Amino acid sequence: MDSVKTIFDFILDLGAPVFVPLIMIVIGLVVRMKFKEAFTSALTLGVAFVGMGLVVGFMMDSIGPAAQQFVKNTGIELNAIDGGWTSMATLAWAWPLAFLMFPFQIGVNLIMLATKQTNTLNVDLWNVWGKILTAVLVVGVTGNVVAAFIIAVIQMFAELKLADVNQKQIQKLTQIPGVTTTHSMNIIGVILYPLNRLLDFVPGMKKQIDANWLKQRLGIFAENHVMGFIIAVLLGIFAKYSVQETLMLGIQGATALTLFPMVAKLFMQALAPLSDATSEFMKKRFEGREFYIGLDWPIMAGCNEMWVTTIMLVPITLLLAVVLPGNNILPFAGIINLSIAVPALIVTGGNLVRMVILGAVTTPVFLYIATVFAPTITNLAMDTKALEVPAGQLISWSTIEYPVFRYVFAHAANVINGEILGLIGAIVWLGLFIWYLKGMKKVSDRIVTEEGNPFDKIA
């Protein structure tokens, strides 16, 4: 058992920039790509992952201190530390049974492919840590390891079904054929979908207001670098920065929004040849069936609406953290809420106004569930000795991914200890999940009708 764990630990310790390209080389060779082409595509993909990590880290390092200063200026004391995703990943990997989640994810994917329950081959295996974290939280609530793995398997099933129905929308947004996003953060789309449908009844909300619309109406003020500068300067003013600090923050914001689409083009450059080869290979062997490659969220990073939304949500998140009664977490490491921006981009089709509204409406959910989970996460951190938490403080994640799913199903699993409300919540969630699948299937059919199916164009 220890030797198996060592093997999996070594593979996963490579990280996404190394691990995913290695898998892509193997897939490329299987679908008859020349080694030179497969290697070049995989290497470019690794460069894209590293580049995106650098830009995201740069933006967080710039925006984070200003956000923290804003809250300090209010005089409000919040004693739950926001450790961000890196701290939660550390906690997840410290779980003694973490390595078992890797074969579980592969097994579920292969079974669903064989039974035609999905058309997505998930190669984003490094993000298995998200399922591990869910399992760890279930154990923290219920104390039951079997229940933890059952909920993790449900999450794997859900992310693959979502990857299928989201694929055409993702393809339309990114212009990269044959790929989809299997990141579990898209699970919160199940909650966003009905909220987005409600916006249909609000006057003016059916207008598609995206980055291109803004450029046509606002000219230079809608350019990436100008929007980044303006939003960052406003945040600097809220943080009571000096003039020099505010201007520097503005330049940093402009830099981030300028670089994101540049780096995102690398994903298209890396994935397009592999997607074409995979599609041709599958079409010859499985007539009438499409297959998609499931990847991490950065393939969507070229959509400007996502980054504008994340930055605009920063002051909204901080304000809500200060004024919401019962909130106990200070947003810091998780202040850039990709957990909402990515699924909101998919659900709305890139409607910037709707994305910001959905983000503002659901931010309290993130904060409250992060607060509720803080004692559980802190106890787990102390038990595993994975994280050091100062005395008198708690640790959590202010923008914890798919918070509703994790909270509802952790407590649904606690039915074994007599808890009923969680089970009712899980049943409601499953109803919304089915509604989402049906709704996004209609969106996919409409996109195919309007734009055609790129798989049909491959000889």
Image (tube, rainbow, N blue to C red):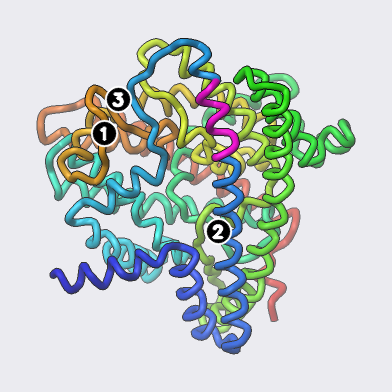
Circle 3 crowding by C-alpha within 10 Å: few under 14, some 14–19, many from 20: some
| Mark whose residue sits in front, 3 or 2 | 3
Q: Residue at x 59, y 55 (%)?
A: 52
Q: Which numbered tag is attached to residue 180?
A: 2
- Type of amino acid under label 2: Thr
Circle 1 crowding by C-alpha within 10 Å: few under 14, some 14–19, many from 20: some
Q: Residue at x 45, y 36 (%)?
A: 333
**Residue 444 located left or right of residue 181:** right
| Mark whose residue sits in front, 3 or 1 | 1
Q: Residue at x 50, y 18 (%)?
A: 71
- Type of amino acid under label 1: Val
Q: Is residue 445 above or below residue 370?
A: below
Q: Residue at x 57, y 77 (%)?
A: 278
Q: Which numbered tag is attached to residue 372?
A: 3
Q: Which numbered tag is attached to residue 352?
A: none
Q: Is residue 235 above or below residue 110?
A: above
Q: Position of residue 284 (x, y in %)?
A: 57, 83
- Type of amino acid under label 3: Val
Residue 98 falls in image quadrant = bottom left
Circle 2 crowding by C-alpha within 10 Å: few under 14, some 14–19, many from 20: many
| Mark whose residue sits in front, 2 or 1 | 1
Tags 3 and 2 in contact by the CB under 8 Å rule? Answer: no
Provide the residue span drawn in magenta.
61-69
Numbered label tally: 3
Q: Position of residue 172 (x, y in %)?
A: 69, 54
Majority SS type along the magenta span:
helix
Q: Which numbered tag is attached to residue 389?
A: 1
Where the N terminus falls, by quadrant?
bottom left
Q: Which comes sooner in the sequence, label 3 or label 2?
A: 2
Q: Which comes sooner in the sequence, label 3 or label 1?
A: 3
